[in-house]
Amino acid sequence: MNFFAQQERARSHTRRMLILFVLAVVAIVGAVDLVLMIAFGAIGHDKQHRLNFGAVQPQAIFWASAAVLLLIGLCTMYKVASLRGGGGVVARQLGGVLIEPGTSDPGYKRLRNVVEEIAIASGVPVPEIYVLEDEQAINAFAAGYTPSDAAVTVTRGTLERLNRDELQGVIAHEFSHVLNGDMRLNIRLMGVLFGILVIGILGRKLVENTGRSRDSGGIVAFGFAILAIGYIGVFFGRLIKAGISRQREFLADASAVQFTRQTLGIGGALKKIGALEAGSKLGSAETEEVAHMLFCDGVGYGALFATHPPLVQRITLLDPQFKPTEFVEIAQRLARQDSAAEQAEPAGGAEPKGAQGAFGDLMPGIGGRLKQGVGLAIGAAAAGALPGANSQITLTPNKVATQVAHPGQDDYRAAAAIHTTISERLRAFAYMAERAPQVIYALTLDEDRAVREKQLRIVEKAHDAATRAGVEEIGAEVSSLHPLQRLPLAQLTFPCLRRRPRPQLQSFLIALNQLIQADGRVQLAEYCLARLITVQVVDALDPSKSKPTGSLKLTSCAEEIADVFAVIACYGNDDSADAQRAYLLGMHEVMPDSIREYAEVKEWSLALDRALPKLDQLTPAGKELVVRGLTRAIGADGKVSVTEAELLRAICATLHCPLPPQLDQAA
């Protein structure tokens, strides 16, 4: 499952969505015109009950059609505008409760730890996390335009019914939608479909609010006609959702298995959905709008309009030995577990049913393996010592490109090790609204005392003396961080950072830019960190305007590609000849037939400021070649240091090509 191919697939689905939307609009306009023609006598029957076409007024039909088009267009734009705030808007619309980073609730904390570790393993900012407290079914969804404005939402039933492996499988499934562009398509689909559903809503309101008098009969009939027309929109809306969503669920299941390296987690969650009476069906009136986003069918659609493949089919692909009769046995065991939990519940209240391993014994032959798998994962995380800061590895461009947005179990273990070895104190700072920007400032502080003092004065001028003292305090701890921990620490700040008011975020970006240019000799690593934060903050400020994929061809970005590769080659090599060799190797991977002559870039930070935004607008296929070329250039000398690997990750992230923390080495 190649990330860049998935991006192209999402683009093709967008085109198909627009075509179906146009067909739906044409059908609705035609039906409205037909109703109006009948209502006003343009079509009727003569005395012999034969169909008779009276005097049709083309002008009246034109204006009626224009009014319907205007209504659909305005409603679509209204809905799209209401969703501009990103994934959190969708979660709150369904009644989601935001889980604060510093939560002490055991169930919430377990959920947050899983989400944070998967975010670190995926190389993306930690999303906002919501819980639908009134929903006892097992379900979840991810919403947003980009990873920078994403929100992951789970139901209360998901928290209480799933063990950690199962929860990890569900969250990994949702992260597949975040990473592969599905999430962006989903939220756009919400806006588009509202426009074609609004006719039915108006018809229903007209019928409900019209009086019962004799004179209202015609209006009621007209209302029923409009309501019937509205079902054309419902039909097309559900058809669009079904056509776009179904196949992606198989891919997301496969991604979750690739990530967790076992089928018991996501398979166990699906089995519990089939066994429980609540299943995955949600009670919210807004479920129809988000049905295509959910982990499992939350509405109860028939086969024609199903947004998800049949549950048994999904389970069988994960566990070929599964028989539907197992649902009964699982349900019985769950009921016995609930009964035992109620009897054993202490006066102060029981621990959440979703605690680690709570349902490990619920499925025949699986309990022991689940516990063993959890133990192995935790042991690996605990024992997963980070590589030495000066260690070197060998990378293969093709393998690195394959890793983009597709973390594996090793990445999860590395992320767990990174997450647990970042000090509690630093994590606490990252979770605090006032301290999160200070953490980012501290990550840019220079080792040189004079430069650092100048940077601290910039912070004090932009904010106040207390902020300066906070940055200085955090900087003392940040200086001892392992290179692999710097980007993940920045990722942890994002839930707090993105909720700051727009003026504060804009001031933050200005100060951050001043910090990295404090002495005129900006280091490439700190530049890329600041650039990455800037890109993510801008994405979060205007989520709907961000474009993670573009349409530019490599040939139209030849100058920018040459500049980026020249900067990278110069950074990794002191000798000019070695730098030129690295540059040529990288360029040969991207544009073998039109390699520009190597030239050292003098104003490299300005060159990158100009080049990276343009490269971000490349087609997915073009970005794949750029990632491969960057890997080749950085590893031209046969070895890649940890710092160089982090530099590669930072640059790729600015191009919306997130890399996991542990890059696959060459055999």
Image (cartoon, helix red, strand yellow):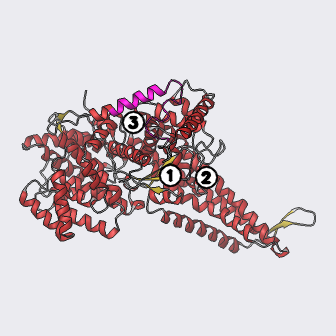
Q: Secondary structure at mark 2?
A: loop
Pick the quarter of the image with the N terminus. top left
**How much space separates mark 2 and mark 1, taking CA atoms?**
32 Å
**Residue extending farthest right:** 48
Q: Nearer the viewer, residue 71 or 454?
A: 454
Closer to the camera, 47 or 91? Answer: 91
In the image, is residue 574 above or below residue 130? above
Residue hosting label 2: 283
Q: Which mark is residue 15?
A: 1
User: Are there few (<14), some (14-19), or many (20+) residues within 10 Å of tag 1?
Assistant: few
Q: Label 3 is placed on what type of residue?
A: Phe
Q: Is residue 1 left or right of residue 577?
A: right
The residue tagged 3 is 259
The disc labelled 2 sits on which kind of residue? Gly
Q: Amino acid at mark 1?
A: Arg
Circle 2 Cα neighbour tier, 10 Å, few/some/many (<14 / 14–19 / ≥20): some
Q: Quadrant of the C terminus?
A: top left
Relative side of 243 to 518, left or right: right
* Local SS, label 1: helix
Helix, strand or loop status at disc 3: helix
Q: Nearer the viewer, mark 1 or mark 3?
A: 3
**119 w.r.t. 270: above or below:** below
